[in-house]
Amino acid sequence: NFMLTQPHSVSESPGKTVTISCTGSSGSIASNYVQWYQQRPGSAPTTVIYEDNQRPSGVPDRFSGSIDSSSNSASLTISGLKTEDEADYYCQSYDSSNRVFGGGTKLTVL
Amino acid sequence: QVQLVQSGAEVKKPGASVKVSCKASGYTFTSYGISWVRQAPGQGLEWMGWISAYNGNTNYAQKLQGRVTMTTDTSTSTAYMELRSLRSDDTAVYYCARDLEPRGAARFDPWGQGTLVTVSS
């Protein structure tokens, strides 16, 4: 079964840049689009990146996504960190007809 | 605006069933699917399955096969998720989300507000 692996947690200071990785277990992560969702405590997830590197309207351009085929991984980069970016972040893709989530990464902005 | 509104919290005993509803508005219901995702307390997101609102085709996560049924009522633009033989580890917040396949990538936008299902004797 296809799996996505994320670091459990990352932390960085306000104003800095952080990158969260999402590594595919098999095949090529570039074969299917990767999405990134932000989830604040007590709220439903919302999309911050879709189709590898597309930003929904209303998401600041401090958020960007990329794919690295050589490491079979996707990355979410947040620049100019703000305290409001503190949240859980999940990558998501699909394999055959099954949707798959990464385990989630808790971002602490301190 | 596109919106999904879910039914309220439920408390069930082990062995019982629960049925959660998800009413869609702001878009053509039959043009997309609905996925269901759950999140146990303090845990990550788990995809449960998908249903096409166009023709009712379903695809369930292997882990839940035989215990879950997803349906839609196109006359009211409402999707339903029923989970049977409930266990304590089914305690979770259950989300519905518009699934953009086949009109786009298999991704979720927007999400419902979530429904807490508590399984306890």
Image (spheres, helix red, strand yellow):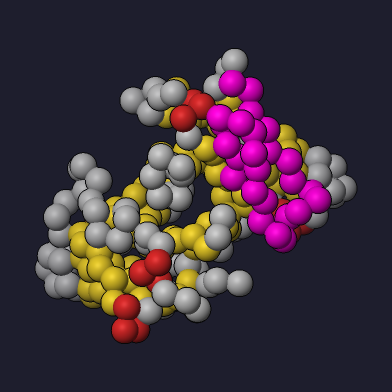
Residue at x-position 58% and y-position 17%: B76
Residue at x-position 34% and y-position 50%: A47
Residue at x-position 56% and y-position 30%: B54
Residue at x-position 70% and y-position 46%: B118
A107 and B49: which one is in front?
B49
Per the image, is B69 magenta?
yes
Q: Is residue A94 left or right of residue B18?
A: left
Residue numbers of the magenta segment: B50-74
Q: Is residue A72 left or right of residue A5?
A: left
Q: Is residue B104 left or right of residue B93?
A: left
Q: Quadrant of residue B9?
A: top right
In which quadrant will I find the N terminus of chain B?
top left
| Residue A92 percent location from the top left of the image | 44, 60
Q: Quadrant of residue A31?
A: bottom left
Per the image, is A90 magenta?
no
Asked if one can make out residue A20 in the rendered structure from this viewpoint, the answer is no
Which residue is most to the right?
Answer: B15
Which residue is most to the bottom?
Answer: A70
| Residue B72 percent location from the top left of the image | 63, 28
